[in-house]
C-alpha cells in the first residue's frame, strides 16, 4: 500500500472543524477551542453541522458527511480537527467519498469514536491520520503542555519525529524480550472491534498494534481481546503497545471479577512478539499523539518507542512508499 502523508501545518493555514460523531455538550468549548487555534496564528473554518444535534449525534449522517467532504474538498483547508468523539462515526463509513480524500490528503485529528473513521480512511486511501487532542476536549481550556508540545511538533515538522515518551518518569512495562518495527495502527479498543468483519478494517500484518480505552469493565476488555485472539490478529502483528486503560476496573465490587491486569496478562501469554504497556495515550488530559500509518520501533530492553520517520511532508509530493 502507498502511504499518503499530509502536508505539514504552518502559521496562517486554515484548520477545519468537524463533529463526525457527537456534538460537544457545551458549545462554549467550541468557541474557546477556536480562540486557542487563532491565538497560535491559524485561521479556522467551522463545519455547518458542528453545533447541530440529532439525538446523540451532531446532525444527521448526511449533514456530518457533507462537513467531512467539504473540508477535504476545500483547497484552503490544510488540517481537520474533530471537536470530540462520542457516538456515531461508524455510521458514516459506507457513505464517505474515499477517492476525494485520496486526491486531497490532509491532516485529520481525533481519537475515541474517531478511531473508526481514521482506520477506515487508512484502509481505503493509505492516509496517515493523528490520534490526538480534540478541539472541545483538550484545546478549549489550558491544554496540557506535554500534550500540546507532542501534537504540534508532530504536525508542523517534516523532520523525523523521534521518541514517544511518558511525562514525570511514568514507567513503561515490557513483556517478551526483543525489538520490533512496523506501522502503527489501532486506537480505541472497542471501536477497532466494530470494524472487524467489514471492508473498513486495515490489515494488521506487520503492524505495531496500539490500543487504549475508557470506562470498560474487565469482562468487556476480555471480550474485545478474545476477538483479536480468535481472529488470528495477534499472529499477524510485529509488536503491541497497551496504552492508557482509563477507569477500566470493575465497578461492581460485590460480584466475582478479574482485575484488568489479570485479563491483560491472560492474553499477553498468547502473544510472542514484544509488548510495551502503560504508554501515556488515550482518554487522559496528558498524552502522546499517535500517527496511524507511520513506521515505529519498540524495544522491550530500553522500553522505548521511536517514530522512525516524519509524520508530515513539506513538499508537493504526497506519496511515500
Image (spheres, rainbow, N blue to C red):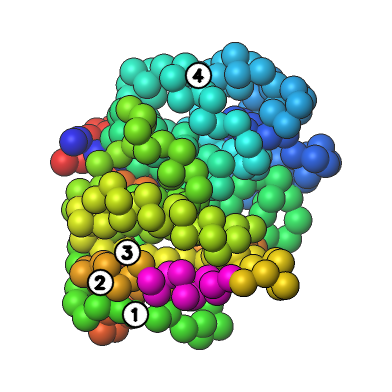
Looking at the image, residue 299 sits to the left or right of residue 141; the answer is left
Identify the image quadrant of residue 216. Answer: bottom right
In the image, 35 versus 2, the foreground residue is 2
Q: Tell me the CA gap for discs 2 and 4.
A: 39 Å
Residue ID for mark 1: 174
Label 4 neighbourhood size at 10 Å, few (<14), some (14-19), many (20+)? some
Which numbered disc, 4 or 1, marks the residue that appears first in the sequence?
4
- Where disc 3 sits, the SS reads strand
Label 1 neighbourhood size at 10 Å, few (<14), some (14-19), many (20+)? many
What's drawn in magenta, residue-wise? 257-266
Q: Can you say which quadrant of the picture contains the C terminus? A: top left
Q: Tell me the CA gap for discs 3 and 2.
A: 7 Å
Mark 3 and mark 2 residues within 8 Å of each other at the beta carbon: yes
Residue 75 in the image, given as x and y percentages of width and height: 46, 21
Q: Which mark is residue 69?
A: 4
- At 30% from the left and 79% from the top, the residue drawn is 175
In the image, 70 versus 184, the foreground residue is 184
Residue 171 appearing in the image: yes
Which numbered disc, 3 or 4, marks the residue that appears first in the sequence?
4
- Where disc 4 sits, the SS reads helix
Depicted 148 relative to depicted 305: above or below: above
Mark 2 and mark 1 residues within 8 Å of each other at the beta carbon: yes
Name the dominant secondary structure of the magenta segment: helix
Residue ID for mark 3: 240
Amino acid at each position: 500500500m502507498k502511504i499518503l502523508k499530509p502536508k505539514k501545518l504552518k502559521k496562517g493555514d486554515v484548520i477545519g472543524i468537524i463533529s463526525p460523531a457527537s456534538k460537544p455538550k457545551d458549545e462554549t468549548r467550541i468557541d474557546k477551542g477556536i480562540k486557542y487555534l487563532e491565538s497560535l496564528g491559524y485561521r479556522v473554518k467551522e463545519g455547518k453541522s458542528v453545533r447541530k444535534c440529532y439525538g446523540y449525534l451532531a446532525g444527521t449522517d448526511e449533514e456530518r458527511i457533507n462537513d467531512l467532504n467539504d473540508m477535504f474538498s476545500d483547497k484552503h483547508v490544510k488540517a481537520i480537527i474533530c471537536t470530540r468523539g462520542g457516538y456515531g462515526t461508524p455510521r458514516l463509513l459506507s457513505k464517505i467519498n474515499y477517492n476525494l480524500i485520496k486526491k486531497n490528503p490532509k491532516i485529520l485529528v481525533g481519537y475515541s469514536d474517531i478511531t473508526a473513521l481514521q482506520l477506515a480512511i487508512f484502509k481505503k486511501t493509505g492516509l496517515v491520520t493523528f490520534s490526538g487532542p480534540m478541539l472541545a476536549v483538550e484545546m478549549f481550556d489550558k491544554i496540557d503542555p506535554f500534550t500540546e508540545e507532542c501534537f504540534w511538533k508532530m504536525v508542523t515538522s517534516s523532520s523525523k519525529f523521534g521518541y514517544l515518551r511518558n511525562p514525570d518518569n511514568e514507567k513503561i512495562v515490557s513483556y517478551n524480550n526483543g525489538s520490533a518495527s512496523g506501522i502503527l495502527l489501532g486506537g480505541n479498543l472497542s471501536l477497532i472491534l466494530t470494524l472487524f468483519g467489514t471492508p473498513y478494517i486495515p490489515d494488521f500484518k506487520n503492524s505495531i498494534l496500539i490500543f487504549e480505552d475508557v470506562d470498560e469493565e474487565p469482562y468487556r476488555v476480555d471480550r474485545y481481546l478474545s476477538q483479536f485472539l480468535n481472529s488470528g490478529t495477534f499472529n499477524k502483528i510485529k509488536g503491541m503497545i497497551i496504552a492508557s486503560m482509563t477507569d477500566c476496573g470493575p465497578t461492581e465490587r460485590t460480584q466475582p471479577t478479574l482485575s484488568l491486569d489479570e485479563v491483560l496478562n491472560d492474553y499477553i501469554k498468547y502473544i510472542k512478539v514484544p509488548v510495551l504497556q502503560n504508554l501515556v495515550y488515550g482518554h487522559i488530559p496528558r498524552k502522546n499523539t499517535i500517527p496511524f500509518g507511520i513506521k515505529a520501533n519498540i524495544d522491550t530492553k530500553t522500553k522505548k518507542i521511536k517514530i522512525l520517520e516524519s509524520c508530515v511532508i513539506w513538499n508537493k509530493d504526497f506519496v511515500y512508499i
